[in-house]
Amino acid sequence: MYHGRIIETGRYLPEFNVSNDDITKLVDTSDEWIYSRTGIKNRRIAKDESVVYMAASAAKNAISKCELDSMNIDMIVVATVSPDYAMPSVACMVQEQLGAENAFCFDVNAACSGFVYGLDIIDQFIKTRKVKNALLIGVEKFSHLLNWEDRDTCVLFGDGAGAVIIEATETEIGIIDTQSRSIGKQFEALVSPLNNNDTPFYNESSEAYITMDGRAVFQFAVTKVSALLKEVFQTQNISADEIDIYVLHQANSRIIEGIAKRLKQPIDKFYMNMESYGNTSAATIPIALDELNRAGELIGKTIALSGFGAGLTYGTAIVKF
Ligand code: COA
């Protein structure tokens, strides 16, 4: 049976760096507070880059390494909740930049779970043989959604993009399992409203930014992500020990430590880079995969991926490289 296999990775991170010390000039916080609670020290901010630019740059980075002809890309999925425009989709605008004229394209709104949701969706299209080659991008520009006077949220996020190329394969290597879950009744825990204009008929104008119940999100992430990983291990008849590297959403080092504890796994099996980039939402997992790939750390490994975020949404994939 056909399934998807990640054959190449790429990333784009804006040049402009904002450290915790830089943020202390904006809000009442400290490097010590941010780092000890989140593991974050720096984040990149897209001062000059649009979401489409970051997404297309990450995609070009991946495509250039595997010599894939853009005309052979059948499907482009972009995971994002911070697009430049409500329409068209980021995916359609990336298609234009790549000249991938044969692809069908759409965005997925699953917040920080967007990349694993996208992997799940693409794998289904590959399994039903509708798609041979797909491009999946996770990209976010949360800097334009944040209230930079709100210390509860502005210290956590960063901008960036990661991309993977997925091809159909019949080998044992590739996407072994994917699971996507949602808990809509907890949607209020993490919200980013749209800033609407007044109309001649009703008044809807607002200046609204991201709000978050940090403790609720923390609790949800640790319990649900570890439970779903255990469920997938059971379904696949593998143990947590058989996973070589855990690449979880890079929201917070303490969340990852909590999940590692519940899975009884050593923390050094859990990749972490939030110190450098903060939480780039849908982009954290593909950026991490590209860093591992560049370091030659993916080949021959079995990797567990997990995303979690607004919705609330969460999802997991087991991938053999
Ligand atoms: N700097 C300094 N103090 C801050 C602060 C900041 N940036 N942000 C909040 N505080 C203050 C609070 O106002 C509170 O003060 P008070 O006790 O006087 O009311 C105090 O720090 C403790 O806040 P609390 O919310 O209890 O901290 P916490 O230990 O729960 O850590 C988070 C807060 C946000 C770091 C933590 O809840 C978390 O990581 N949650 C998950 C968030 C996340 O990852 N979201 C994205 C998911 S995709």
Image (spheres, rainbow, N blue to C red):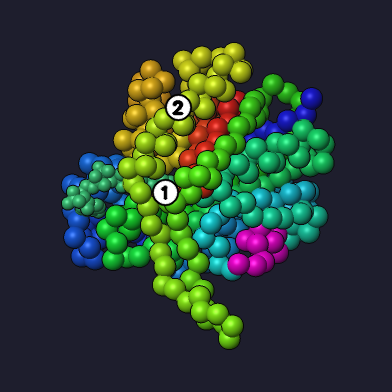
Q: Nearer the viewer, residue 161 or 182?
A: 182
The location of residue 269, given as percent across then percent down, is: 41, 25
Left or right position of 14 against 39 = right
Magenta span dominant secondary structure:
helix
The answer to which image quadrant residue 150 occupies is bottom left
Mark 1 in CB contact with mark 2 (< 8 angstroms): no
The location of residue 137, given as percent across then percent down, is: 59, 50
Question: CA–CA distance between discs 1 and 2?
Answer: 19 Å
Crowd class of label 2 (few under 14; some 14 to 19; many from 20; radius 10 Å): many
Residue 226 numbered mark, or none: 2
The location of residue 314, given as percent across then percent down, is: 52, 38
Residue 189 numbered mark, or none: 1
Crowd class of label 1 (few under 14; some 14 to 19; many from 20; radius 10 Å): some
- The answer to whether residue 258 is above or below residue 185 is above
The answer to which image quadrant residue 267 occupies is top left
Identified at 52% across, 33% down, the residue is: 305
**Type of amino acid at the residue the image marks with label 1:** Ala
Decide if residue 293 is in sight here: no
Identified at 44% across, 51% down, the residue is: 188
**Type of amino acid at the residue the image marks with label 2:** Ser
Please identify, in this view, whether the residue under mark 1 or under mark 2 is nearer the observer: 1
Identified at 52% across, 41% down, the residue is: 183
Query: Mark 2 CB in 8 Å range of ligand 1?
Result: no
| Residue 89 within the magenta-colored segment of the rendering | yes
Left or right position of 138 against 13 = right
Q: Nearer the viewer, residue 135 or 128?
A: 128
Q: Which residues are magenta?
A: 86-97
